[in-house]
Amino acid sequence: MTLSADGQLLASGDTDGTARLWDRSTGRLLGTLRGHTGVLWGVALSADGQILASGGREGTVKIWETNSGVCLRTLRPDRRYERVDITGLTGINEAQRQALLDMGATEQHRTPAI
């Protein structure tokens, strides 16, 4: 949980992957921000309360506009094989190829010559 600098906006994170914004003085729910796929580990508000950052267990940080609830950006660290080109890689089976792609590798699909 975090409180805005003026003490009026409260933000909380939940195990269902949502962040919630509350009016602290009335206890009224102002909005629910959905976008994470797992438990939220933390939330933080900008000094003016206009931006919320939420960090999820899936390894992303989402930047939200508090007034509209719009996700402005999703930050994600590079995965182990991020941007490694495996085009033409031999000696691996299809499951291994897919695992590399799931970890960030890329593959250029070439149309065979006729």
Image (cartoon, grey):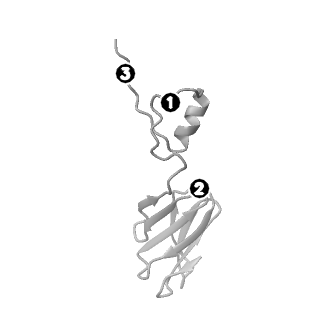
Residue bearing the label numbered 3: 111
- The numbered dot on residue 58 is 2
Is 112 drawn above or below residue 37 in the view shown?
above
Q: Quadrant of the N terminus?
A: bottom right
For numbered disc 1, what is the local secondary structure?
loop
Return the x and y of residue 64 as percentages of the image width and height.
44, 66
Q: Kindly indicate the quadrant of the structure image that contains residue 11.
A: bottom right
x 49%, y 57%: residue: 76
Q: Nearer the viewer, residue 39 or 97?
A: 97
The three-letter amino acid code for the residue at tag 3 is Thr
Q: Quadrant of the C terminus?
A: top left
x 49%, y 82%: residue: 4
The three-letter amino acid code for the residue at tag 1 is Leu
Q: Separation of disc 3 and disc 1 at Cα?
A: 16 Å
Q: Are there few (<14), some (14-19), or many (20+) residues within 10 Å of tag 1?
A: few
Q: Is residue 101 left or right of residue 15?
A: left
From this viewpoint, which residue is outermost toward the right?
Answer: 15
